[in-house]
Image (cartoon, rainbow, N blue to C red):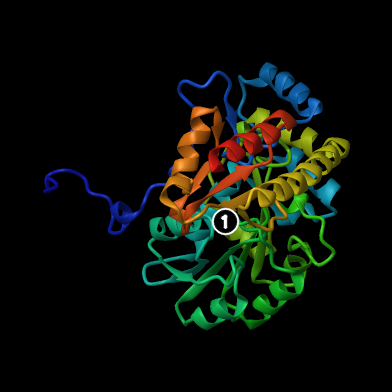
Amino acid sequence: MASLDRPRPKAGILNIAAYVPGKESAPGATKVYKLSANETPLGPSPHALTSYREAAHRLDVYPDGQAKALREAIAETQGLNLANIICGNGSDELLGLLAQTYLAAGDEAIVTEHGFLIYKIQTIAAGGTPVTVKEKDERIDVDAILQAVTSRTKLVFIANPSNPTGTYLPFEEVRRLHAGLPKTVLLVLDAAYAEYVRRNDYEAGVELVSSNENAVMTRTFSKIHGLPGLRIGWMYAPAHVIDAVGRVRGPFNLNSAAIAAGAAAIRDRAHVETAVAFNDKWLRWLDAELTALGLRVTPSVANFLLVHFPDAPEKSAEQADAYLVSKGYILRRVGAYGFPNALRLTVGPEEANRGVVAALSEFLK
């Protein structure tokens, strides 16, 4: 029994299932390929690295609390109004700030069945109640979300593209979702993988946010920009949301190196396009090769694939994971996302992509 003579967390905190990152090591393997965190194999822009090094000469002063240089770079490259951009310590912080700002005890936030686990964690931490709705064929179900809306609903979180499935909602469906929500409900569009999508019916959310008062879009520098170690995220939102979130945001939530490197990274459009082309090539190759092995692969528009394994116990995702780790290939177990018999595979460098397919071929024999 827990002691009663010590500080205790508020109700609900100890009910949170803590987020567990993917494995980092493969003991015994000669060479390790980490294909579990959706990191880009191309790394960051050389310009970002240069700016990062230059920032080392300014570590004796506080960073700009408004991250103006980074916000200016985002506004310039994305064609957005500077005043409607706020930056955070990864998009995770911004998602948490939204929960803190808009949820109180008794309020509800809608999340989807296979959605990013942080949505539930931040909702509970803020004192709200997560309401999980089913997906359909591993895709967000707009009708299911709308049916779950009540007078207590304050936030709706959707990842588009979604993680770990890699599926997406066409923008007309996002519009339909937004149109069906009460004006008092804030739609949060988590577009962490938006840069990878090359579909004519996809839009990250800029247009929707620009013309409405109850929608926001979050983005990250951890994926295509190759800067997860610096933790940089940003949000495009109506002025009243920026004002409210800004009141609870820490005054120096981004460090100087992150601001400088992020600004350089988003301006290097050639590096981004190279990363997109590389991903498009190897995502399609991996999909085809894994399907040829007899594995079901969820169609993805991101930089990863959800790979489903046979029902046979000796060929399960758990067994495949153990075998792959022994060979130095680290994939992501996704049981916590509702896929106990699947692994998420990040597109890696060419040798890793070819190697993991060869290893799976041997495993499935």
Q: Nearer the viewer, residue 353 or 152?
A: 353
Q: Which residue lies furthest to the front in this view?
A: 365
Amino acid type, residue under disc 1 in the picture: Val
Left or right of residue 204: residue 332: left
Classify residue 89 by image quadrant. Answer: top right
Q: Residue furthest right?
A: 270
Seen at 66% across and 63% down, the residue is 216
Q: In this view, does 214 lie above or below 32?
A: below
Q: Horizontal and vertical percent for residue 125? A: 39, 55
Seen at 60% across and 74% down, the residue is 141
Seen at 73% across and 50% down, the residue is 288
Q: Which of 131 and 60 is in front in this view?
A: 131
Q: Tell me if mark 1 has few (under 14), some (14-19) or many (20+) residues whose alpha carbon lies within 10 angstroms of its own.
A: some
Q: Horizontal and vertical percent for residue 291? A: 67, 52
Q: Nearer the viewer, residue 191 or 356?
A: 356
Whether residue 25 can be seen here? no
Left or right of residue 53: residue 312: left
Which residue is under mark 1?
A: 245
The C terminus lies in quadrant: top right
Left or right of residue 4: residue 302: right
